[in-house]
């Protein structure tokens, strides 16, 4: 498992291609948008995972040593307990489909972390860290142009322009965009002192300014806090004390200028301060207490096994209903009546994996922090600020569940966990002359497994993206027909056939049974519509699905059952009141 990194040794083709595919992971998915039900996160995730597996497959040919050498790798020690606990949840969860799909993502991320930590040498890793500011700056520039009305190619036609939510760039929403700029900003700050005065330094400084300005425009306070804390630590650790103090003063001045210059950010901060003064913590946190309480409830109900990796979403509604019975107050007029994530990685880990998972996570964090503390002074000046920034993001967001954020973070953690032996100033023994340097027999296991995983991911990516496009096509056709007030002959049967194709390719997409239920409602077939909506509720309970199930039951003549579904929908989302007949509320 040892890598060949001595300074005079030529880099092998496997190492070169492993690095090239890693470059692809950091650059290509950022701009990959595909028309479908999910146009941003899903395409980026599928492509990033494919490129990540291709990178690790190339690096697997460099495996050296045996199992003992593998266990000595900090990345393996950090991840092994966590992977075991998460995988065991497949046999204990009530949501095997969601858990299986989420476990695939987890194992691919783990393979990238281990492969990039062991297979890429320090200089390759730092070249890749140096790439981060450039795609981030391009994303930020697109967001800035959107905000100022110069370029809005991704705005949905006919929708009003929202100064904040409209800043999507190619990320899909301002939250993802803001969070994905955090590590690139820190990487740029870390690299700037090493560059000689000239065009390269000015270009990197310009990229940093563009990223910071866009970050301010997104008004994502958690990301701003992460950059502020991480940047302050980095300047303090990276620069001489006097220069660091000057830098911190300049950074504080820049932050003040951004707040004063960006009126929406100024207003948002003012609103948050007013809410804090009023003692309304949930408003300050934009409703995050709702997601956090649900995660704690899940952990209390399943302390040993958790609900299963990736099963937070289908368990959220039962958690919310139980908490409502306990008179827990949820944020009124919440824009997200159902949370897909807890907006806190640590609480969601507890909900997914139970107490054993939290212990495994604590062990992994201990290994990561230990590696950061043992790093050289130069490396430590980015490792500790980067970990601090990721911690802040993890407390208020879900950076490891969105590809645009997760894979740069995985690369950063791989760099932190790289054994210190590979520091350029140290002389590494010539591994090829030792028995441990001979090609490991593990190569004949790892390479076929990774090749098979890449093949499976190719099919998985094709199927999920095609299902998303089919679903979007069905929805557009149905909306157009409803808007015109007429249903072309054969439209609904054709849509149902398309939905059967989509379901065969992606059984975890809740939109497919929902769309099927809608088609049967258009046919006035209440019984089949109800069956479709019940199937959707098994995948992902949502208030609007309960609403539509009530409509289907009403159509089939079961008023009592319909009333119960309507009341359940209203309990979860009171804003649905106008859509429900007064006598059935």
Image: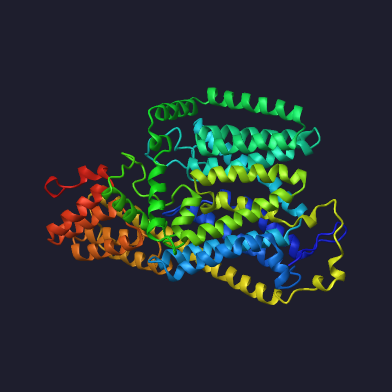
Q: Quadrant of the N terminus?
A: bottom right
Residue 417 appears in which quarter of the rendering? bottom right
* Residue 21 horizontal side relative to residue 284, left or right: right
Q: Position of residue 355 (x, y in %)?
A: 48, 59
User: Residue at left 71%, top 27%?
Assistant: 245
The residue lying toward the viewer, choosing from 44 and 547, is: 547
The residue lying toward the viewer, choosing from 55 and 322, is: 322
The way the protein has been coloured in the rendering is: rainbow
The residue lying toward the viewer, choosing from 499 and 16, is: 16
Q: Position of residue 133 (x, y in %)?
A: 66, 42
In this picture, is 352 found above or below 161?
Answer: below
In this picture, is 131 found above or below 500?
Answer: above
Q: Position of residue 288 (x, y in %)?
A: 42, 43
* Residue 508 horizontal side relative to residue 249, left or right: left
Whether residue 151 is visible here, answered yes or no, is no
The residue lying toward the viewer, choosing from 81 and 160, is: 81
In this picture, is 496 found above or below 155?
Answer: below
Q: How many marks?
A: 0
User: Residue at left 57%, top 39%?
Assistant: 226
Whether residue 159 is visible here, answered yes or no, is yes
Residue 7 appears in which quarter of the rendering? bottom right
User: Residue at left 65%, top 53%?
Assistant: 368
User: Residue at left 59%, top 58%?
Assistant: 363
Q: Position of residue 452 (x, y in %)?
A: 59, 73
In this picture, is 485 found above or below 144?
Answer: below
* Residue 558 horizontal side relative to residue 269, left or right: left
């Amino acid at each position: 498992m040892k890598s060949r990194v001595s300074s005079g040794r030529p880099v092998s083709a496997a190492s070169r291609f492993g690095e090239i595919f890693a470059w692809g992971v950091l650059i290509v998915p950022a701009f990959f948008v595909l028309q479908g039900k999910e146009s941003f996160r899903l395409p980026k995730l599928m492509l990033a995972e494919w490129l990540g597996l291709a990178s690790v497959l190339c690096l697997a040919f460099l495996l050296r040593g045996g199992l003992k050498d593998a266990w000595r790798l900090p990345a393996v020690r950090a991840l092994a307990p966590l992977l075991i606990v998460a995988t065991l949840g497949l046999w204990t969860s009530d949501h095997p489909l969601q858990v299986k799909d989420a476990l695939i993502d987890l194992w691919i991320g783990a393979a990238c972390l281990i492969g990039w930590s062991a297979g890429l040498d320090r200089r390759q890793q730092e070249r890749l860290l140096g790439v981060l500011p450039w795609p981030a700056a391009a994303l930020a520039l697109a967001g800035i142009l959107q905000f100022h009305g110069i370029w809005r190619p991704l705005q949905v036609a006919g929708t009003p322009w929202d100064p904040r939510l409209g800043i999507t760039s190619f990320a899909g929403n301002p939250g993802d965009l803001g969070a994905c700029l955090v590590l690139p900003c820190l990487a740029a700050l870390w690299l700037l002192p090493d560059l000689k005065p000239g065009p390269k330094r000015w270009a990197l400084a310009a990229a940093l300014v563009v990223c910071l300005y866009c970050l301010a425009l997104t008004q994502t306070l958690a990301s701003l806090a992460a950059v502020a804390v991480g940047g302050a630590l980095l300047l303090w650790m990276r620069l001489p004390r006097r220069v660091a103090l000057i830098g911190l003063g300049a950074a504080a001045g820049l932050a003040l200028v951004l707040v004063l210059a960006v009126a929406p950010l100024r207003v948002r901060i003012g609103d948050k301060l007013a809410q804090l003064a009023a003692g309304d913590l949930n408003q300050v946190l934009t409703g995050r207490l709702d997601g956090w309480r649900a995660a704690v409830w899940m952990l209390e109900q399943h302390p040993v096994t958790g609900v299963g990796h990736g099963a937070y979403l289908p368990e959220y509604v039962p958690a919310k209903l139980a908490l409502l019975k306990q008179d827990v107050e949820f944020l009124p007029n919440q824009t997200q009546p159902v949370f897909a994530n807890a907006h806190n990685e640590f609480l969601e880990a507890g909900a997914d994996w139970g107490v054993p998972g939290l212990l495994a996570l604590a062990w992994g964090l201990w290994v990561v922090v230990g590696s950061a503390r043992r790093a050289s002074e130069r490396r430590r000046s980015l490792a500790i600020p980067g970990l601090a920034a990721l911690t802040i993001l993890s407390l208020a967001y879900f950076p490891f569940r969105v590809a645009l954020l997760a894979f740069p973070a995985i690369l950063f953690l791989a760099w932190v966990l790289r054994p210190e032996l590979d520091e350029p100033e140290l002389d590494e023994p010539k591994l090829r002359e030792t028995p441990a340097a001979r090609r490991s027999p593990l190569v004949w296991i790892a390479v076929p497994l990774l090749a098979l995983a890449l093949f499976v991911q190719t099919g998985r990516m094709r199927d999920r993206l095609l299902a998303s496009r089919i679903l979007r096509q069905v929805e557009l056709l149905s909306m157009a027909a409803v808007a015109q007030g007429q249903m072309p002959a054969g439209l609904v049967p054709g849509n149902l056939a398309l939905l059967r194709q989509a379901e065969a390719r992606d059984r975890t997409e809740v939109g497919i049974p929902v769309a099927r239920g809608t088609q049967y409602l258009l046919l006035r077939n209440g019984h089949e519509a109800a069956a479709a909506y019940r199937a959707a509720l098994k995948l992902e309970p949502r208030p609007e699905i309960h609403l539509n199930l009530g409509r289907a039951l009403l159509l089939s003549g079961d008023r009592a059952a319909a009333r119960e579904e309507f009341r359940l929908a209203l309990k979860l989302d009171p804003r649905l009141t106008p859509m429900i007949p007064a006598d059935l509320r």
